[in-house]
Image (spheres, rainbow, N blue to C red):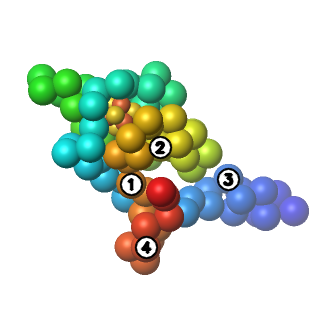
Amino acid sequence: MSSKVIKKIKKRDIQKIVVDRDLCIGAAPCVVVAPSAFELDSEGKAIVLKDWIKHTDDELLIAAQSCPVQAILLFDKLGKQIFP
Ligand code: SF4
């Protein structure tokens, strides 16, 4: 049973995050929801930090959903876009 629990915790569908800089308006809810994953650069646009992996899939999904212009794209390990 414990191995099942570990497997569940380690399960991760999101393998890649892309911010569409043309869409991003620097509204920043993504930074608030997932501060280890997103930061605003000098142009006021979100960039993806390497520590994004510290966030759970749920947190990353909420961050992507919080973006008012859907500029955060999430991909799975097969390269398939899973959000939006
Ligand atoms: S929430 Fe969307 S628009 Fe706002 S900074 Fe993040 S990616 Fe850009």
Vertical relation: 20 (above or below) 29: below
Decide: marks 4, 1 in contact (CB < 8 A)?
no
Of the numbered discs 2 and 1, the one sitting upstream in the chain is: 2
- Callout 3 amino acid: Ile
Task: Work out how far the residue at label 4 is from the one at label 3, CA to CA, in angstroms.
Answer: 22 Å
Decide: marks 2, 1 in contact (CB < 8 A)?
yes
Q: At which x and y percent is residue 74?
A: 43, 57
- Callout 4 amino acid: Lys
- Residue tagged by mark 4? 80
Q: Residues within 10 Å of mark 4 (few under 14, many from 20)?
A: few
- Residue tagged by mark 2? 64
Vertical relation: 18 (above or below) 55: below
Task: Work out how far the residue at label 4 is from the one at label 1, CA to CA, in angstroms.
Answer: 10 Å
- Callout 2 amino acid: Ala
**Mark 4: secondary structure:** loop
The quadrant of the picture occupied by the N terminus is bottom right
- Callout 1 amino acid: Leu
Report which quarter residue 16 is drawn in. Answer: bottom left
Residue furthest to the left in view is: 42
Q: At which x and y percent is residue 65?
A: 53, 42
Residue positioned 50% across, 64% down in the render: 82
Residue 73, label in figure:
1
Task: Work out how far the residue at label 4 is from the one at label 2, CA to CA, in angstroms.
Answer: 16 Å
**Mark 3: secondary structure:** helix
